[in-house]
Amino acid sequence: MGLHLEERADGSLALYMDGDLQFDTHDEAYYHECLALPALCLAEPAQAGALTVTILGGGDGLALRECLRFPGVARVTLVDYSHEVVDLARGRLAELNHNAFADPRVTVVCGDAWDYLEQADPCDVLLVDLTVPRRTDECRLHTREGYARMKRVLAPGGVAAINGLSPQRTPEAFWCLRRTMRAAGLFSLPYRVPMPSFWAHGYGVWSFFLAARRPLRRRVLADLTCPVSTRQADFSALHALSRFARSERHVEALVPTNTLAEPCLLPLILNPRETRPPASPDGEDEPYRLDGLLSALSILHPYHTREMVETLAADVVGTVRRLDLDRLVQALLERAARLPAELVAELVRLREFLRGRAEGLERLGLWCQRVLVILYLVVTMANLLSPDNVFAKGSFGAHGSFGHASSTHSTSIGGGSSTASAHVTGRGFGAGYGRGHVTDIEGRTTGARRFLYDPDTVHIYLGHGYRGPRPAPAQAEQNAVIAAASDVLVMDNGDVVVTLADDAYLVASQGQVSLLSTKSGTPLTALYADPDLFKRLGDEVQRQRGAVTKELELRRDWLGWVGWARFLPTVNADRLEAANLADAGQRLDKSVQRLGKPASSESLGAPDPTSVELFVGGYLSPDGKVSLRQPDRSWLTTDGRHLDRGDSSQACPPELAAALRSIMTKLEKDMTADLAATWTDLSTLDKDLATLKTDLTEYQRLSGANGPSYYVDYGTDSITAQDAISRTERDITQTQSDRDNLAREAQRMQTDLGHLRPAMPRFGAAEK
Amino acid sequence: MPIDDREHGSEEPAPIAHASHAAPNEHVHLSHRHTSRLEAARSGERAERRVALAVACLGYLVLATRNPRVWGQGLWAALALLAVPAVAGVAAGLVAEARSDFGERLRRAAGGVGWAMGGYALVSMTMVRARMGSGTSSALLTIPVVAGVLAVAAGLVGGLCAAGVSRLAVKE
């Protein structure tokens, strides 16, 4: 415990305990008179004229002094835990307390008040003059349990006076005391005690509580009559000082009760609503301007009294005044002169340190940078060399139709040859190659295609005039391996098959071509080997061979890099693909060899200009007969029932009729679709033509109104009206020409369909 | 009142705290020496690596005019994995700093040759793959792995040559 007695020059005293002001002789009489005398006045002694008083705390003897001068006080027990305070009161403060401890009525108990209350005898007046609690254990007497003990000690007519807190600075704590007293069953009556010394220390207006086991009304203070004179207290104002506004009393409902189980008083004291110290009321002379210093202190504890701060400030000022500033500045300058070199050294060390730490990250960044640059270069170069492949936009050209060679409404045979380079993008040349699937040059696969014919007897002529033995039906199927075009297949034996319809196909080999049915193992008839057909087929197969060769070389180039890395699955797949491409190339080579050249180099036309070409060498006449050009250039005609050659006639083989019917059905279907598309195109062209004519009229109007140099909108451009008129006229001419050609084509298709449709039923019923 | 040296310490101000116990000025000089030596070493390292990279790039530029298949697999392997790295390694070894040890010389030359071979292989393979039109997605793993293996092999040859040449130079 820190005990400090402040002795001033004017002879006044002030006592501090742990930094808290206990009393100041300037107003201590007011404090102790207000504490002791009202309670003494209001107490109803158990024995008349023999008041018993117990003082808890108050070791300075000043409250004791007030008790002893009150008439009728028979016995006073003072309980204080501090020997030092009691000794001080007996010695240095004896004059101030009128040597109260020497009075025979006084009993001093040095001990804990909590323990004393537990076994104390009842008393008429209980004065609680404890210091303001600054620790949790010091709050024990202000708990509900503590007040309950006080209630037990208090005689039925007794009155207790309890040192309270400031209702101004710590209203929550103040009303917590009141609420706790009520909870303990005590009736309490608070009243303010405006102490100048307390005010100067920032404690605010102080307060006391009167408490009793019986109700205490404020009017008892108004009627209070004190039998002893007071030096500073004026009890006539006590009634007014006990008045609290409703807003102040309202706080009591908001604060909790302080109990041993749930102590709350100390937090309420240390966290008051208002913590700012008041301005100095009397403007006393300050040796230093402490406001700035006080505000600079981050924590200003109540222990830090104004005098302490002043002492601290005086020490600081004294220290500063003792400094030899000239020498200090000189030393600082010398130090500063050396500082740059030291700073440089420190910075160098820092740089080395950072380099060491950042080396790893630097290296990682460098690697990332290199990889990104290489990737960028690779992608850029690859894009420059082959943009389509880099962005996977490559495509193989159109697939022409070889069977309907000269038909303008089907894809032209010549147009079937694409100049675009083919790339193997599918997996047809992978593990599935040659296992029943048909693979095209792009690596796409379709289902198995098998054809029943004998390669050795496929070109034997079976028509009229054939003198040899009829060949036996083929027993073995020939498998297609490569799709050279949409209707051209390369067989595993090297033959080239041109599919005409579901039931009919052509086999071209050894410079000969024959018509076969998928439903018969024997050939239907041999046909005139058209050199154009063989040339186109040969060219297409050669082109395919070239594409295969190129792809094969690319894969060999690739395998030249990665071929040794057989531990990678993709490399093995590439090796297999290269092997299959090589096999496909060999088959195509074989196919070219087996295709051969026709005996004649002359291309022969249709028997009648109005005939409809069904396939190469097969025509439908307007009279409904199909003419097939034989290898000897003669015509074999059939109406579906009879097969005529020159002057001889025989029944038409049903396989031949069915095959022709199948071809006509497919052709009719294709032509119908083409015709519908042509009509649509014609309609579009008509609309375009109408729009162009409207535009031309508008341009002419604008030209007439504003002159030929007038600028008009022409699409997204702005050109002169004269230019717009000439361009539009040119567009109209071109569109009209296209439309006329298309209309002629449509007319021709209509005519062909007019021949085709009536003839079809003669060759048998359509298959569903 | 003058400052009492006995109370306030000596006139010589205490140095700023250092990690080592060396005096500040001495520390500065040591740092300069260390830094210059470090710079010299790094400069030598860069030169060695650059020479290896440049010579290897030149060699691979010649090799890149043809595909390995066209060169012939055996000839190409001999050129790309032995001849070019060896020449580049020897060139790098001739400019290598004599004080550096075997491992450092090997690492520096191998880095230069390896980068050159890796770049050459990466670019060439990507171009071939792009021309194939099969897409490079299936080769996303193959190209880096093969390029990496080739780069390591070539770098090892180049590094060994560089280190060997440097050792011979030191002995002489």
Image: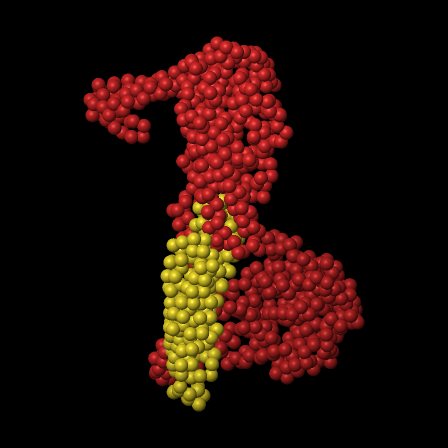
- Which chain is yellow in the picture? B
Q: In terms of depth relative to the viewer, which is nearer, A455 or A190?
A: A455
Image point (20%, 23%), residue name:
A708
Q: Is residue A355 visible?
A: no
Quarter of the image with the N terminus of chain A is: bottom right
Residue pushed farthest front?
A: A467
Q: Residue at x 45, y 33 (%)?
A: A538
Residue A554 image offset from top left, x and y in percent: 46, 47
Q: Quadrant of the C terminus of chain A?
A: top right
> Measured along the vertical axis of the image, is residue A230 above or below residue A579?
below
- Residue A445 left/right relative to A629: right
Q: Residue at x 79, y 67 (%)?
A: A46
**Does any portion of residue A8 appear in the rendered image?**
yes
Quarter holding residue A344: bottom left
Q: Position of residue A675 (x, y in %)?
A: 46, 18
Above/below status of A316 relative to A257 = below
- Among the chains pictured, the one given red colouring is A
